[in-house]
Amino acid sequence: MHHLTPDEAADALTDPAGPHLIGVRHHAPSLAAAMPALLDEARPDVLLVELPADLQDWLPWLAHEDTRAPVALAAAPGDGHGGCAFYPFADFSPELVAVRWAARRGLPVTACDLPLSDPAWRSRDPAPSTTTGPGPGTGPRLHAALRSRATGRPGDDLWDRLVEAAAPGSPPEALRRAALLTGWALRRDATASGGVPALDLVRERWMRSAVARATARGARAAVVVGAFHAPALLPGAALPVAPALSSRRPARLVGPAPRGRPPQLGAADCRGVRSRLPAGGCPLGVRRLR
């Protein structure tokens, strides 16, 4: 999609012929507030959320009426290789709002990201993919140009300016388009700067397969995914080939989801756990667990 104009990209990402993509940023309050209206309008038959497939059995607990945010899902490989993963949620987390919305309507929810047991997560190879887009140094970075045009201040965060700051008073669909366009701009720049990281490509191929399975019999899918990944989930999206990241056999995660009431975890239970959220930490109101 690197050859498209911003308007063409936004139209492609919101094309009703494809899956109903809702590009988010973790803990983005604007998308969390708009999520119920966006899903009501989409009327999906199934909801896919960017969470590792190994956590599928825990999704009912995440949406359980007795579960109170802030809450987190954590996982560790059963073979002892690699670190733990930690997924915190607050009431302003778009993914949590979406899972709760689906639970209230009895809709199936699929954790559509690459399983944490896949060895690709533990690869130390950060090499980006080979791309067919513009090479490094080709023209100005798009997200920098958009940010400069919006405020003129180079240090501003593009998402905050184009999505969060514009959210009050904006229709939910306009907010959805702004979020998807921001993700497209960041991805276009990543492509122009040497390529999308290989791990992201592996994850996106898994997500595409999950969407294909969910819609194979004509079901309408809504997909809540990081806005950066959304362009890769369009039908017919041309993705570069990701290199093999590891030959190690996937490990089984420790422990299935429990039965009964939602489990309670304290900070002491989460020591040494590594967050899978992007660098920059948790937003105001969500404490780091040490």
Image (tube, rainbow, N blue to C red):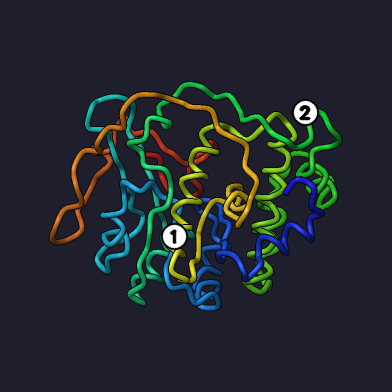
Q: Between residues 216 and 67, which one lies in front from this camera angle? A: 216
Q: Position of residue 264 (x, y in %)?
A: 21, 52
Q: Residues within 10 Å of mark 2 (few under 14, many from 20)?
A: some
Q: Between residues 154 and 4, which one lies in front from this camera angle? A: 4
Q: Residue at x 19, y 47 (%)?
A: 256
Q: Position of residue 279 (x, y in %)?
A: 53, 36
Residue on which disc 1 sits? 48
- Check disc 1 and report its element: helix, strand or loop: strand
Q: Position of residue 52 (x, y in %)?
A: 38, 46
Q: Is residue 97 left or right of residue 11?
A: left
* Type of amino acid under label 2: Pro
Q: Residue at x 53, y 38 (%)?
A: 200
Residue on which disc 2 sits? 136
Q: Which corner quadrant of the image does residue 106 belong to?
A: bottom left
The residues bearing labels 2 and 1 have C-alpha atoms spaced at a distance of: 34 Å
Q: Residue at x 73, y 44 (%)?
A: 156
Q: In the figure, 39 relative to 258: above or below?
A: below
